[in-house]
Image (cartoon, rainbow, N blue to C red):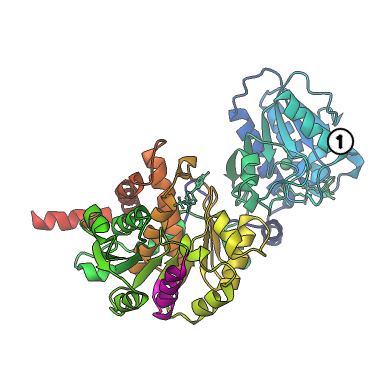
Amino acid sequence: MLSQDGSGAEILTVEEMYSADRLAIAGGVAGRDLMEAAGTAVADSVLLYESSRAGAVLVLCGPGNNGGDGFVVARRLKAAGRAVRLALLGDRSALTGDAAAAAADWDGEIEVLDPAGLEDVALVVDALFGAGLNRPLDGLSAAMVEAVERAGLPVLAVDVPSGLAGDRGDAPDGPAFRADRTVTFFRKKPAHLIVPARFFCGDVQVAQIGIPESVLQEISPRLFENSPALWLAGFPWRPAEAHKYQAGHALISGGTEMTGAAQLASRAALRIGAGLVSLACSPASLPIYALANPSVITLAVGAAADFVAALADPRRNAVLVGPGNGVGADTRERAIAALEAGRSLVLDADALTVFEGRTEELFKLTAASAGETVLTPHDGEFRRLFPGIAGDPLERARVAAAQSGAIVVLKGPDTVVAAPDRRASINGSAPPWLATAGTGDVLSGMIVGLLAQGMPAFLAAGAAVWIHAQAAFAFGPGMISEDLPDALPKVLARLSDEAGRAVDYRKIVNNFR
Ligand SMILES: NC(=O)C1=CN([C@@H]2O[C@H](COP(=O)(O)OP(=O)(O)OC[C@H]3O[C@@H](n4cnc5c(N)ncnc54)[C@H](O)[C@@H]3O)[C@@H](O)[C@H]2O)[C@@H](O)CC1
Ligand SMILES: Nc1ncnc2c1ncn2[C@@H]1O[C@H](COP(=O)(O)OP(=O)(O)O)[C@@H](O)[C@H]1O
Ligand SMILES: [K+]
């Protein structure tokens, strides 16, 4: 299935991309043809780019195949009548293979790379290094990055902005181009999606260059850009004959002082389709919860034993502990009770913090639980729970998932969902106005709502993260977390159209007329 930009949702590591090239070439596609297609796609993108400056396009070529692409770009632009200059890092005689062939087809001048030679340039095409970057930029290439930045020139990067490692989402070790647009080939790479690397890439376009889709079977990627392509087929739309218990019953643990968090989660769980939501809270806080959301069932839970009793009803099939629950033994006991009851479980916020320094106990319970567990830390909670894990968000989430045996949702502008078997998704776009108090509570409520409806945890977490971001986009700036649950129906309607279910609903409506 295709994602919104028309390419598949798979994300390839640099190694996997080299395999894709190799497999395509082994299947009879010429490497030179791939390069020609790559350079042509970049040239087409340049021709559509509206620079506010007059002057030539300056193509900066490196010593490898990324530079080879650059030679094709220059030739295509010249053929289209665009003023173009080309500058090469290193000796022309050092070019080999497809890059040497592409250079031979360029009949213009080859300038020496010169940071002082930026007069009358409208746009820079960065074809210095792509997938092959293996150390930080230094010397001339580093000086070039600085000069282009100083001159404030727009940059269009070929494959990856030079200075960034395609596999990594963290900040580059040295200078790197800040591109306005990056044209990459076949599939995106991790650096195109993970923050802060993503901010160096600008708009990312994926061009198809003749690599057959069939190579993906051999590569079998484990990383995906989060999109409906990943989980829409497993989305729990209500069947026509459903009664509410078939849509699951989420049990949400509420706190005594911070009562807003579990309310937000409850409303989100209902909006995403859970048949029933019960909210367990102290007798003293029950009136607050009972008045807030008439559709939420409130349960007075005084002692830990009462929460265990609330779990005894097997219809309460998915549980959320943490939002506003307080950092204390009571919250930990509730989390442990839910794990021991074998329920599908989301641990968020305080229910993560209470396991700081006690993760072995937690991971034993998640391993033994009959249900799937989802952990939804933001960066701070992650550091508390997994102090020893370093790396970019993708690597950290994957290691944490492997260690904990749980699905880990590492939240941020690039939320990663990782499973213990290394499957992972990265959410490529979410609006910054999600950075407001309570949006995480809404997200955990959405996940538990989908778990209650029987969606497998990796899919449920991916769906919730994507829909959450889309709802925020749909509402727009100024959004606060209360707005989010009520913005869900619009996104769900769009999704159900996409899933072809709208027809079914219309049929049902017509039957009643
Ligand atoms: N058939 C293919 O392999 C295709 C490759 N394509 C292009 O080829 C690129 C990959 O080409 P390459 O593997 O040749 O790699 P690059 O062109 O990215 O760079 C390789 C060269 O740069 C050197 N190098 C790496 N880091 C350096 C640094 N910091 N300073 C100085 N030198 C450095 C390496 O030692 C090597 O000689 C892709 O990014 C893409 O643009 C496209 O043409 C599509 C087809
Ligand atoms: N800069 C940002 N851009 C996009 N999304 C963000 C950004 N910062 C945070 N988010 C999202 O907002 C939510 C915040 O959750 P969380 O930190 O748990 O907040 P809270 O505890 O207040 O509920 C997460 O879904 C996260 O992915
Ligand atoms: K590049």
Left or right relative to 425: residue 446: left
Q: Nearer the viewer, residue 253 or 49?
A: 253
Measuring from the top left, give residue 243's x and y in whole percent. 19, 68
- Residue in view at x 52 percent, y 70 percent: 406
Image point (30%, 73%), residue name: 316
Helix, strand or loop at disc 1? Answer: helix
Residue 9 position (above or below residue 430):
below
Image quadrant assignment for residue 383: bottom right
Residue 29 in percent (x, y) is at 68, 55
Does the rendering let one see residue 162?
yes
Residue 220 in view, yes or no: no
Choose between 177 and 5: the one closer to the eye. Answer: 177
Q: Is residue 346 left or right of residue 174?
A: left
Amino acid residing under circle 1: Leu
Residue 147: x, y in percent?
79, 28
Q: Which secondary structure dominates the residues rendered in magenta? A: helix
Q: Is residue 261 left or right of residue 99?
A: left
Q: What range is drawn magenta here? A: 328-344
- Within 10 angstroms of label 1, few (less than 14), some, or many (20 or more) residues? some
Residue wearing tag 1: 140
Side (left or right) of 235 relative to 122 = left
